[in-house]
Image (spheres, helix red, strand yellow):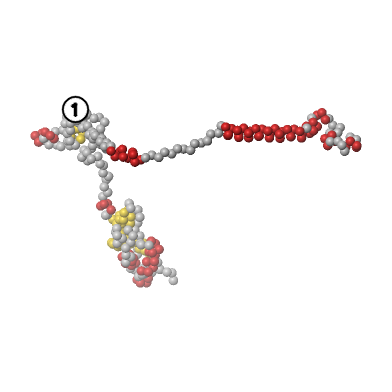
């Protein structure tokens, strides 16, 4: 492009100088501003039409919601009318129909001449369609009703088996929770350190060992029948172990099936000399 034409030429003409302007890119850039203005005007027109249509439809076709109507009900008139009406009669009591029933006669071995007429059992043929009960009763035959059992005199009550308390009065050798000294092992250790005395005879003869003491702890925790069943027989260790158990006071009773019971208890007591 000549120099004198550059100052007056469009920027697109300078860019596309010497290029194929018929290809399309030149025309698109040349008409870009016009197309942009047309698009903005068209969009604004559509929005304006939608807004006008919505406004007009609300003015002409819009309906106002009516408020709900609440009416008061006069309860006094209703109650007054009901007071004047007589109460309805109670429903008639319908008694269930009596079912034909034959009295159950328990078997009893007696002589023929001692059999009473009323104690004779009914014949087997008559019992096929007859219910067995506690009394003889005439009525309709009912195949859908079961007569009450004879053992409970028609009460229909099944009693649970009663537990025999005598089982808990015996002395148990094995229990769920064994008896123990009140306060547990720590309290037992403190009691032993305070009350146990090592016999002089055993010290002089260097006798030591473990003495097992058996005794009974009753339901209240009282200790009885204390005796040493194993351990050194000389030196007085058994006698000292028995003395300590008798002096220990009340113990915590054993528990079996959630109840405190009387039980045997075996308590080992260790006698040990310190090395010199």
Residue at (25% x, 36% y) in the render = 89
Q: Let me know if residue 151 appears in the view.
A: no
Q: Position of residue 249 (x, y in %)?
A: 32, 65
Q: Residue furthest top?
A: 125
Above or below: residue 17 compared with residue 186: above
Question: Residue 272 is drawn in which quadrant?
Answer: bottom left
Q: Which residue is mark 1?
A: 125
Q: Secondary structure at mark 1?
A: loop
Q: Nearer the viewer, residue 95 or 98?
A: 95
Above or below: residue 269 compared with residue 22: below
Judge from the rendering whether residue 115 lies leftward or rightward of residue 263; answer left or right.
left
Question: Residue 4 is drawn in which quadrant?
Answer: top right
Residue at (51% x, 36% y) in the render = 65
Judge from the rendering whether residue 63 lies leftward or rightward of residue 131; answer left or right.
right
Q: Residue furthest left?
A: 113
| Screen quadrant of the C terminus | bottom left
Q: Position of residue 239 (x, y in %)?
A: 32, 67
Judge from the rendering whether residue 270 lies leftward or rightward of residue 23; answer left or right.
left
- At label 1, counting other C-alpha atoms closer than 10 Å, the crowd grade (few under 14, some 14-19, many 20 or more) is few
Q: Let me know if residue 61 appears in the view.
A: yes
Q: Nearer the viewer, residue 113 or 137?
A: 137
Q: Nearer the viewer, residue 197 or 69?
A: 69
| Screen quadrant of the N terminus | top right
Q: Position of residue 270 (x, y in %)?
A: 38, 64
Q: Position of residue 46 (x, y in %)?
A: 66, 32
Residue at (22% x, 32% y) in the render = 97
Question: Residue 211 is drawn in which quadrant?
Answer: bottom left
């Amino acid at each position: 492009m000549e120099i004198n034409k550059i100052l007056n030429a469009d920027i697109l003409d300078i860019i596309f100088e010497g290029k194929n302007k018929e290809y399309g890119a030149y025309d698109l850039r040349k008409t870009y501003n016009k197309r942009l203005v047309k698009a903005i005007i068209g969009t604004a027109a559509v929005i304006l039409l939608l807004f006008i249509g919505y406004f007009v439809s609300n003015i002409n076709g819009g309906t106002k919601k009516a408020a709900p109507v609440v009416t008061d009900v006069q309860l006094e008139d209703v109650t007054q009318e009901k007071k004047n009406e007589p109460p309805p009669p109670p429903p008639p009591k319908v008694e269930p129909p009596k079912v034909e029933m034959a009295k159950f006669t328990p078997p009893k071995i007696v002589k023929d001449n001692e059999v009473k007429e009323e104690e004779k059992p009914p014949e087997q043929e008559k019992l096929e369609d007859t219910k067995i009960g506690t009394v003889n009763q005439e009525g309709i035959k009912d195949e859908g009703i079961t007569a009450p059992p004879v053992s409970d005199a028609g009460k229909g009550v099944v009693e649970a088996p009663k537990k025999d308390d005598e089982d808990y009065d015996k002395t148990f050798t094995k229990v769920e929770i064994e008896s123990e000294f009140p306060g547990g092992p720590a309290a037992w250790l403190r009691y032993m350190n305070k009350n146990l005395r090592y016999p002089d005879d055993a010290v002089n003869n260097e006798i030591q060992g473990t003495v097992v003491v058996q005794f009974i702890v009753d339901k209240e925790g009282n200790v009885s029948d204390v005796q040493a069943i194993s351990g050194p027989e000389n030196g007085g260790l058994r006698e000292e172990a028995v003395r300590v158990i008798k002096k220990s006071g009340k113990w915590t009773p054993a528990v079996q099936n959630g109840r405190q019971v009387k039980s045997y208890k075996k308590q080992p007591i260790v006698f040990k000399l310190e090395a010199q």
